[in-house]
Structure formats: structure tokens, C-alpha cells
Image: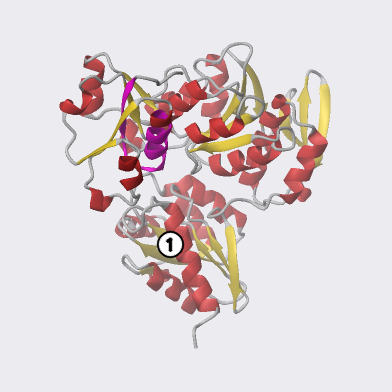
């Protein structure tokens, strides 16, 4: 894709939008970066952009910004339904997400992972697996690094591994990874997409343009992802934690194996996989399935699985205080993800939950809370609804504590309540935007508070 002598408007002054603007400018385009927020509300320094010749337009977005524009690039947080997108299309301006832009710039194979839960762990693990095969491996997208930068890192002789969210898939048109993986589909982001069926349809855009020369890895154990095979043009390889498959990646005699074209490949035992929990076995199977199709040697893959310790903010051990382990699972931004964390520990959990409420169904989550949680500490906007749901599912009122919008108070309360053999777990089942910039900041704050309690200043 050639941006030379073109005019672009990039919407959204986040990490992806800024990266896209810089890249387009270096490619010879005239670039404008627009954000509806005022500069005081933007956490990135925009002076470098201005110094490089990029126009920065902040505040109310009017149609005037579209005059003479060839492309409108959307950051992931920007809904495709905003009026400016409608106006751009009426003017014949091509609208695309930063992910679409990155795909058009890529010169090496791209392997993409989506799903409601498990994306970051699977993508990170897949990136490590691919590094056993290629020197240059880009890892980006929804995982924190702008994808347009990572495809350039991959060059022409490496590959790019991409975590792709439904937000990013809204603005794709030609995006077609050589290998795509869909891990699961559960209710999430319904406020943005409108319904679970629409959310799933957006997820399916990750493989919509694949051909018989491409591959699609699907979770056999999830009915929604299993049904995607019916709409796929690519070759499908299923993975399953629960079933022995005639062909695919699954568990056989407590070993991770792949059966493909009537040949069985043994990888390593379940016990040898360093990241623990049933959900992480699913993530490992998905990552290994993609890596296998991409040409990674399974002996090398076993070495990665035995050494990979997991990702930050996902059931991450923090420290032990008075024989009580503390775990940071800030990345659990929906009930399904928090359920997987609760299932990792058999019982005696002091759980910190709540935050920015997505208004998802809490029934299954709270039923598990009743079984495994001793004390429930609630924070943020969702506290009242979470408390009501806990009570409706039989959790005792005397075991619920609300600490408002203070993570410090929540951590202090957990310490005062916890004793061996209990564990303290932050697994919010909510987004973080009522109290923090994102789940990363929430997790870092939690860890800092816990470590301060472990090593009090005298």
C-alpha cells in the first residue's frame, strides 16, 4: 500500500492511532490526527507529531476535517458507527481500521488470534513459538503494540502474530491472515455491537476472506466456534481439551498431541505445561495448532510450553503475605474470564471484583463464587449489581464487603480477612474505566499495594 501524496485522517489519539499517523507521515502522506477529547484528557505527548508536520485536531469532530481526504483510519476504541465515518463514506472516502492498514503494509505471513477470552496468552505464546522458526517476529494488535509497527518489524522473511479484537475487526475489508484462530465466543462488548449474534459475526470477519490455501483453527469445545467451520473456506483444524478428535489438537493420555493427515505428533504432557489451569491448556493447544500449521517443529514447541510462565495480569502470582498467596488477574474483564480464574483455585478465595459494569449475566459467575469464595470484596460502579447478584445466588450478605472506588481499601480489607489456607485474588469480571485507564493500570496498582503490605515502610 502506497500512502505517498495521499491525505489521511487518523481518528483516535491512542497508541495505535499515533503509530498509524507517524507511519503514514513517513510514507509521504499528508496526515491529520483527530480526537474528540481535549488535549488535557489525552495521556500521550502530541508535540512530537506536530513537530513532524502532522496536523492535530482536537475537540468536536466536524465534516470539515474530511475535505480532500483519501483515507480515514480508525483506532480500535473508535466505533465505526460514529457520524464522521458515515460522512466519510458518503464522500467516497475509504474507511479502515489500523489493523486493516497494517495488513496492507505487511510483506510477511500474518497469523491472527481472536476470541472473547484467552487472546493475550495465546498470542504471546504463539509469538514465542514462532521465534523458534523465524528471527524476525512481530507481535502486536490488541496486545499493546500497534500492528502497523509490528508488520514492519517482521520484514519480508519473518512473520507477524496478531491479537485481534472485535473492535479492530469492525473496520477491515481485505484483512486475510494466512492462519487465523478463534478461541471462543461468549457475551462481551454487547453495548457496542448490539447483540451476541452481531458480536460473533464481527469475530468471523477474521476468516471471511480466507481461501482454501489458508488455515482456520477453531475451538471444538465451544459450540459457537465449532459452527464456524460451516462458513469457512479455509482448511479447518480443531482443538479440544475435552474430546479426542479424529484430526486436530487435543489431549491423549495426558499429553498434548496433534493428529494431522493421519500422523500423530506428541508434544509434551499436560503436567509439563508451565502455565496452569484448564483454560491455559486450551490456550496452549490453540497456539501449538497455529504454530504447527506454520511449520514450527513440535520438539521446539515443547520447550516453549515448558518454559512459558504466562502473561502479566492473568492469574499472575504477586507475593505471599503471612502464608497467603496474592494473585493479580486484572485482565479478567468479563465474568467468563473470572470464572476461569476461580476454577484455578479449589476453594477458600478472598475475591476482589467489580469495576466498570458491562451489564453481562452474572448467574454462572456468582454460583461459582458461592462455591469457592469465602469473602467477596466489591469495588467500583458494578458493586451494587454484583452484590445483588451474589445475594440472589445464595452468597451470604455477611461475607460481602464494599470498598467504594478505593483499590487501596480493597487490598487492605483482603489482608485483614485472609489467613492460611486462603488466597487473595483480584479477578474483577469487569472493565476498569471507572477507576483506571485500563486493566494494566489496575493490575499494576494492585501489585504495588500488595507489595507495600508485604514490605511496609518503617
**How has the structure been colored for display?**
secondary structure
Q: Position of residue 425 (x, y in %)?
A: 52, 63
Q: Position of residue 172 (x, y in %)?
A: 42, 22
Position of 343 relative to 265 (above/below)? below
Comparing 352 with 384, the one in front is: 352
Say whether residue 323 is left or right of residue 103: right
Comparing 252 with 206, the one in front is: 206
Position of 355 relative to 10 (above/below)? below
Comparing 75 with 57, the one in front is: 57
Query: Residue at the location (64% across, 45% down)?
Result: 280
Query: Residue at the location (41% across, 66% down)?
Result: 377
Please check the rendered image and state whether residue 9 is part of the magenta-colored stretch, yes or no: yes
Position of 252 relative to 307 (above/below)? above
Query: Residue at the location (38% across, 73% down)?
Result: 409
Q: Position of residue 320 (x, y in %)?
A: 61, 72
Query: Residue at the location (79% across, 38% down)?
Result: 300
- What residue span does the magenta drawing correspond to? 6-24
Say whether residue 345 is left or right of residue 148: right
Q: In which quadrant of the rendered view does residue 254 lie?
A: top right
Say whether residue 117 is left or right of residue 392: right
Under circle 1, the secondary element is loop
What residue is disc 1 on? 395
**Camera sees residue 17:** yes
Amino acid at each position: 500500500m502506497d500512502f505517498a501524496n495521499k491525505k489521511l485522517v487518523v481518528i483516535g489519539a491512542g497508541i495505535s492511532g499515533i503509530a498509524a499517523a507517524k507511519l503514514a507521515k513517513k510514507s509521504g502522506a499528508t496526515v491529520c490526527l483527530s480526537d474528540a477529547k481535549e488535549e488535557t484528557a489525552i495521556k500521550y505527548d502530541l508535540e512530537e507529531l506536530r513537530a513532524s508536520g502532522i496536523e492535530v485536531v482536537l475537540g468536536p469532530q466536524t465534516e470539515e476535517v474530511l475535505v480532500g481526504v483519501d483515507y480515514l483510519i480508525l483506532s480500535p476504541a473508535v466505533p465505526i458507527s460514529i457520524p464522521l465515518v458515515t460522512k466519510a463514506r458518503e464522500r467516497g472516502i475509504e474507511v479502515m481500521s489500523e489493523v486493516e492498514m497494517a495488513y496492507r503494509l505487511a510483506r510477511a505471513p500474518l497469523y491472527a488470534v481472536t476470541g472473547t477470552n484467552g487472546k493475550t496468552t495465546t498470542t504471546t505464546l504463539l509469538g514465542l513459538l514462532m521465534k523458534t522458526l523465524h528471527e524476525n517476529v512481530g507481535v502486536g494488535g490488541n496486545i499493546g503494540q500497534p500492528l502497523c509497527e509490528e508488520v514492519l518489524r517482521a520484514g519480508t522473511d519473518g512473520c507477524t502474530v496478531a491479537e485481534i479484537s472485535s473492535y479492530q475487526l469492525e473496520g477491515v475489508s481485505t484483512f486475510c491472515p494466512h492462519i487465523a484462530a478463534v478461541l471462543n465466543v461468549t457475551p462481551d462488548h454487547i453495548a457496542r455491537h448490539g447483540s451476541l449474534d452481531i458480536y460473533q459475526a464481527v469475530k468471523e470477519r477474521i476468516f471471511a476472506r480466507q481461501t482454501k490455501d489458508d488455515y482456520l483453527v477453531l475451538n471444538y469445545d465451544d459450540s459457537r466456534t465449532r459452527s464456524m467451520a460451516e462458513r469457512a473456506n479455509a482448511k479447518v483444524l480443531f482443538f479440544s481439551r475435552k474430546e479426542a478428535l479424529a484430526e486436530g489438537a487435543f489431549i491423549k493420555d495426558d499429553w498434548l498431541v496433534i493428529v494431522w493427515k493421519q500422523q500423530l505428533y506428541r508434544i509434551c504432557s499436560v503436567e509439563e505445561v508451565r502455565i496452569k489451569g484448564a483454560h491455559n491448556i486450551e490456550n496452549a493447544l490453540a497456539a501449538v495448532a497455529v504454530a504447527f500449521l506454520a511449520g514450527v517443529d513440535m520438539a521446539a514447541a515443547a520447550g516453549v510450553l515448558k518454559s512459558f510462565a504466562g502473561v502479566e495480569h492473568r492469574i499472575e502470582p504477586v507475593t505471599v503475605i503471612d502464608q497467603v498467596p496474592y494473585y493479580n488477574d486484572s485482565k479478567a474483564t468479563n465474568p467468563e474470564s473470572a470464572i476461569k480464574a476461580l476454577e484455578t483455585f479449589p476453594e477458600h478465595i478472598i475475591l476482589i471484583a467489580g469495576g466498570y459494569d458491562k451489564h453481562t449475566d452474572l448467574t454462572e459467575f456468582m454460583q461459582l463464587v458461592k462455591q469457592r469464595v469465602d469473602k467477596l470484596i466489591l469495588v467500583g460502579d458494578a458493586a451494587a449489581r454484583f452484590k445483588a447478584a451474589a445475594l440472589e445466588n445464595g452468597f451470604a450478605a455477611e461475607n460481602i464487603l464494599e470498598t467504594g472506588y478505593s483499590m487501596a481499601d480493597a487490598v487492605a480489607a483482603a489482608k485483614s480477612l485472609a489467613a492460611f489456607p486462603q488466597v487473595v485474588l483480584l479477578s474483577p469480571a469487569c472493565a476498569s474505566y471507572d477507576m483506571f485507564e485500563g486493566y494494566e493500570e489496575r493490575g499494576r496498582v494492585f501489585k504495588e499495594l500488595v507489595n507495600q503490605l508485604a514490605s511496609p515502610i518503617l
